[in-house]
Amino acid sequence: MLRLWIILLVIAAPVVFWRPVWGISLLWGFSVCLVPSMVFARFAGQIRGASAVRQSVNRFYRAESAKLLLTAALFAAVFTRDVPISLPVFLCAFVVAQIAQMIVTAKATGRSLRQQ
């Protein structure tokens, strides 16, 4: 996840100076995707072992619920603010962050499975 934030800052910095509304929209789009994912990773990362499967599944569902609620709250926060954003840039940034997050997660999971 840290790599995605670094990539975001490298991309967003020149865009903010070039077109401020696009830069802010880019930052918000990535943030609305990545912040809830980090919360999910924090909660789901605490799940260890298969000794208490039911407890692990419940914790996973709680983590996913927190992620969805936080995503909805952040979307609401973005759309109810008075600060102008570019909706196409915001939504494209959100989708790109979603795809990048899936790729990073797949690579990290594949690497950890191969090491075991």
Image (tube, rainbow, N blue to C red):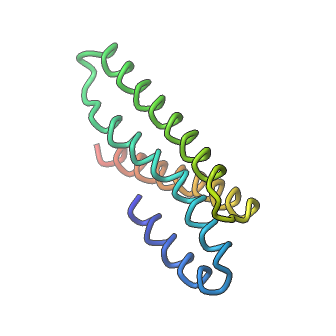
Quadrant, the N terminus: bottom left
Image position of 100 with respect to 47: above or below: below
Image position of 44 with respect to 22: above or below: above
**Which percent across, then down, holds residue 59?**
35, 24
**Residue shown at 49%/48% (left/top)?**
106
- Seen in the image, is 79 located left or right of residue 37? right
**Which percent across, then down, holds residue 26?**
61, 67
Quadrant, the C terminus: top left
For the residue pair 66 and 4, the one nearer the viewer reads as 66
**Which percent across, then down, holds residue 19?**
68, 81
For the residue pair 27 and 97, the one nearer the viewer reads as 27
For the residue pair 93 and 84, the one nearer the viewer reads as 84
Q: Residue furthest right?
A: 88
Image position of 71 with respect to 54: above or below: below
Q: Residue furthest front?
A: 82
**Residue shown at 30%/48% (left/top)?**
115
- Based on the displayed image, in which of its 4 quarters is residue 15 positioned? bottom right
- Seen in the image, is 53 located left or right of residue 63? left
